[in-house]
Image: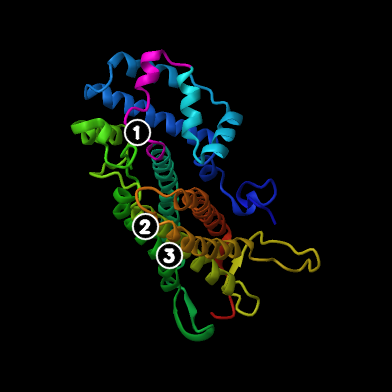
């Protein structure tokens, strides 16, 4: 048991995913925040709100920036957000003109939300690519063995014979629907949530929307007519998508584990897990992990929905809850796609199984 199983030196290989975890480490967070500040400076220069020389200086100096993470941690413990401490470090490296232009018209939530959107979009792309690969593997399995007759089970009891293609469809098709849903959710989830101090972009005057559009385009995010500082339904949709991904793979894992029971013997799994007390056993570790990750994300989804309740124009409590839950949900989804791929590489129909 560990506070952080996903990056634990022992549990991480079972439950974690290095590629997804890298989207949420401190270095990735800081780099994405710097991306926002560079994009903001360039957009404001293009709209005549700051001098082009200041924007060029910001872009150049931020590219060479090396964060003092201890100072950032101390500042975050004091302020509840990292941005004031980060800006303090950045401004000491800039000319007076550039230091004054940095972060113009923005607030801490703009920076943190932009960083989150950039990195969540990156995580979603990794997961989506793996879903495509898993769908392809199920297609290959169907072409090879889909016509095989197996026993269908209803309410955990043997029912009637059916084709193996029927079972494969129940594992594959939800993944295809998840890919389709991501395309629908993306423009609401991966938005530039930018509004300044109280979400109205007032400090940028009539150029606020133009600046927001330019920043969003440079960062590869969707733009919005409002800040969405306290309207988090798009983020909740994405969290639901993550839970649907792990839920679909959990269904596959549960079915696989049941089919691998000695009493059923419909599937076989090469390289199953061993037992310290019963060396004859081959435990379905991968399928079990898929079930665990599905239940984990389903549990966290309820917590993420609590973060929909932002009081007034900004909530410290609801906002912080997102920081705690979303990286875990995304990493769990990534781990599920990784584990599912490993399971498929070792899973096959058992010749002469009991339900033939």
Picture disc at residue 106: 1
SS at badge 2: helix
Q: Residue furthest left?
A: 206
* Mark 1 neighbour class, 10 Å CA radius: few under 14, some 14 to 19, many 20 or more: many
Judged left or right of residue 70, residue 278 is right
Measured along the vertical axis of the image, is residue 239 above or below residue 169?
above
Please indicate, yes or no, whether residue 351 appears anywhere in the rendered image.
Answer: no
Q: CA distance from mark 2 to mark 1?
A: 26 Å
The first of marks 2 and 1 along the sequence is 1
Judged left or right of residue 5, residue 314 is left
Q: Is residue 101 magenta?
A: yes
Picture disc at residue 142: 3
Judged left or right of residue 263, residue 133 is left
Q: CA distance from mark 3 to mark 2?
A: 32 Å
The residue shown at (60%, 54%) is: 15
Query: Which dot, 3 or 2, sits closer to the camera?
Result: 2
Q: Quadrant of residue 343?
A: bottom right
Q: Which of the pair 108/163 is nearer the observer?
A: 108
SS at badge 1: loop
Q: Which residues are magenta?
A: 93-110
The first of marks 3 and 2 along the sequence is 3
Q: CA distance from mark 3 to mark 1?
A: 53 Å
Query: How far across and how far down the image is residue 228, in percent?
Result: 31, 47
The residue shown at (79%, 69%) is: 278
Q: Are marks 3 and 1 in contact (CB under 8 Å)?
A: no
Q: Pointer 2: what residue?
A: 237
């Amino acid at each position: 048991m560990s506070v952080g199983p996903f990056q634990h030196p022992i549990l991480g290989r079972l439950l974690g995913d290095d590629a997804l975890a890298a989207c949420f480490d401190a270095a990735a967070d800081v780099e994405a925040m710097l991306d926002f500040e560079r994009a903001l400076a360039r957009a404001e220069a293009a709209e005549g709100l700051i001098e082009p020389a200041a924007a060029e200086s910001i872009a150049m100096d931020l590219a060479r920036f090396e964060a003092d993470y201890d100072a950032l941690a101390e500042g975050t413990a004091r302020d509840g957000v990292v941005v004031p401490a980060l800006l303090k470090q950045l401004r000491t490296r800039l000319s007076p003109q550039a230091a004054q232009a940095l972060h113009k018209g923005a607030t801490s939530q703009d920076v943190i939300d932009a960083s989150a959107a950039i990195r969540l979009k990156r995580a979603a792309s990794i997961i989506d690519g793996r879903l495509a690969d898993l769908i392809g593997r199920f297609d290959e399995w169907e072409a090879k063995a889909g016509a095989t007759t197996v026993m269908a089970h209803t309410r955990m009891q043997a029912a009637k014979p059916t084709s193996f293609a029927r079972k494969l469809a129940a594992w594959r098709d939800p993944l295809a629907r998840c890919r389709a849903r991501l395309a629908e959710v993306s423009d609401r989830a991966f938005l530039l949530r930018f509004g300044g101090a109280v979400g109205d972009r007032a400090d940028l005057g009539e150029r606020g929307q133009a600046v927001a559009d330019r920043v969003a385009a440079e960062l590869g995010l969707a733009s919005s007519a409002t800040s969405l500082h306290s309207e988090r339904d798009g983020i909740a949709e994405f969290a639901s998508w993550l839970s649907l991904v792990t839920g679909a793979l959990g269904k596959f894992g549960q079915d696989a584990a049941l089919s691998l029971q000695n009493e059923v013997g419909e599937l076989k799994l090469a390289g199953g897990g061993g037992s310290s007390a019963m060396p004859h056993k081959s435990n379905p570790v991968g399928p079990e992990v898929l079930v665990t990750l599905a239940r984990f994300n389903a549990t966290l989804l309820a917590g993420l929905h609590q973060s929909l309740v932002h009081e007034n124009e900004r909530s410290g409590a609801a906002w912080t809850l997102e920081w705690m839950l979303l990286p875990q949900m995304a990493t769990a989804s990534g781990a599920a796609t990784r584990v599912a791929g490993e399971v498929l590489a070792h899973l096959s129909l058992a010749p002469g199984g009991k339900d033939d």
